[in-house]
Structures are given as C-alpha cells and as structure tokens.
Image (cartoon, grey):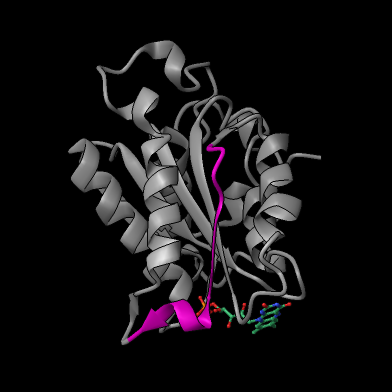
Amino acid sequence: MSTPVIVGFSGSLSSASSTRTLVEDAIKRTVARFKRSSETYDLGQVGTDLGSARSLFDLSEGGRHIVDRIVHAKALVIACPVYKGSYPGLFKHFFDLLDPACLIGKPVLLAAVGGGEKHALMVEQHLRPLFGFFEAQTLATGVYASGQDFADGRLVSPAVIERLERAIGQFTPYLERPFAPEATFSGNVTPLRRQPENLAVAR
Ligand SMILES: Cc1cc2nc3c(=O)[nH]c(=O)nc-3n(C[C@H](O)[C@H](O)[C@H](O)COP(=O)(O)O)c2cc1C
C-alpha cells in the first residue's frame, strides 16, 4: 500500500479520545480541501512496548509501521492531550526515538486538547519547540481545544473550527501544487527499511 500523503497522529491513550476526534476532524477537512490520501493513528496503536523502548527496533511491527508512515508522509497533523501543562511523557518518548533529521522541512499542523482553557499556550510553549528541534515546518497557526469544545464525540466549537480551517489553509504551498522534492525532507534518512544506523535514539 502506498504511503498516504497526510498522516494524523494523536498522542492520547484514551479509548474515547477528544484528541483523536480533533485529529480526525482536521484530517477530514484537509482531505476535503486538498484531495489527498490520509491515515490516522494514535499513541495506543504504537504498542505496549513503547514505554521501555530504547530504539525503534524495540517497537512492535505495528509501532514501526506508524513511524514509517509519519516519516514518509508529505504533511502531518499532530495533536496531544495536555498533561500537567505539557505533552504526555509517553508522547515525548515516541518522538525521542525518531532520528533528528527525519522530519526536516515537513509541514506539521500542531494541536492540543486540555481539560480547560488555562493551558491554551501549551502548543506554543511545548509542542512547537519539540518540532523546532526536528526542524519541521510547523504551520503558523496552532490549534487548542478544551473539553467543552466537543459534544457527542464531535468538535463543535465554531471558534476552534475556524482556527482549524485557518491552520489547514497554511498547508496550501505544500499540498496544492504537484509535489516539489524540496517542499519536504527528501534526504537519505530511511529510518526503517534500509539504514539501521539512522534508528539510533537521538541523544
Ligand atoms: C494525567 C492527566 C493530566 C492532565 N493535566 C491537565 C492539565 O495540566 N491541563 C489541562 O487543561 N488538562 C489536563 N488534563 C485533562 C486532559 O488534557 C483532557 O481531559 C484531554 O481532553 C484528554 O484528552 P483525551 O480525551 O484525548 O484523553 C489532564 C488529564 C490527565 C489524565
């Protein structure tokens, strides 16, 4: 199966997850606008061996497949719940395992979901610096939602939806025209298939 153009990743372990709902909503809107293929995953699907993994080789096949999809996507939608004012530790650990060069230049829509409004700057204070480390092309507009922005398992807040649509619009240079090789990272890091040395834990 060919790699989807847009990959969503929710950093939540919850079974009924607002973070996953937000990622799926964002992916649906992005696909509707740019007519590209997509897949969505969440942290729970990476596998129970994630917590003790010291390198990508320690992950299950399913976990390595998700990494492969993320690394080869043309664009990413990444969201996580707010835990203690930041991202969950296991979400960070997942990204700790990736090669530092594997997201260079990749456009990423960043989003977070908290219980309330107090930590609305979490995207700017924590998520954006993490993807800055990876030299990803984070979209200028970050999206934050809280519990009351969802109803019946759907994102319903007009303000959050408007912000989400604005962020999605910022994918335009990357997704609207035929893909230019320079638009996303196209270096020689092939993290899972051909270059095992690139799998080392980033230190
Ligand atoms: C361990 C833990 C810590 C949390 N810390 C915060 C927090 O600091 N600020 C906040 O706004 N919400 C906090 N929450 C609430 C979650 O961010 C919120 O319920 C979120 O919607 C969960 O997303 P999910 O449905 O995808 O699991 C916390 C929840 C848990 C379980």
Among all residues in the image, which is located at the extreme right? 203
Expressed as whole percent of the image width and height from the top left, the position of residue 53 reads 67, 59
Give the quarter of the figure containing the N terminus.
top left
Expressed as whole percent of the image width and height from the top left, the position of residue 63 reads 47, 57
**Height in image: 140 above or below 25?**
above
Q: Is residue 125 left or right of residue 148?
A: right
Pick whichever, 58 or 78, lies toward us: 78
Query: Quarter-wise, where is residue 140 in the image?
Result: top right
Residue 192 visible (yes or no): no
Tally the numbered discs.
Answer: 0
The residue at 70%/60% (across/down) is 122
Query: Quarter-wise, where is residue 156 in the image?
Result: bottom left
Residue 74 visible (yes or no): yes
Q: Which region shows up in magenta?
A: 139-151
Pick whichever, 81 or 198, lies toward us: 81
Expressed as whole percent of the image width and height from the top left, the position of residue 130 reads 71, 45
Give the quarter of the figure containing the C terminus.
top right
Pick whichever, 190 or 6, lies toward us: 6
Q: Which quarter of the rendered image does ligand 1 occupy?
A: bottom right
The residue at 64%/35% (across/down) is 99
**Height in image: 195 above or below 64?**
above
**Height in image: 53 above or below 57?**
below
Expressed as whole percent of the image width and height from the top left, the position of residue 151 reads 36, 85
Give yes or no for residue 140 being in the magenta stretch. Answer: yes
The residue at 65%/71% (across/down) is 82
Query: Quarter-wise, where is residue 144 in the image?
Result: bottom right
Pick whichever, 177 or 136, lies toward us: 177
Give yes or no for residue 9 being in the magenta stretch. Answer: no
Q: Is residue 137 left or right of residue 63?
A: right
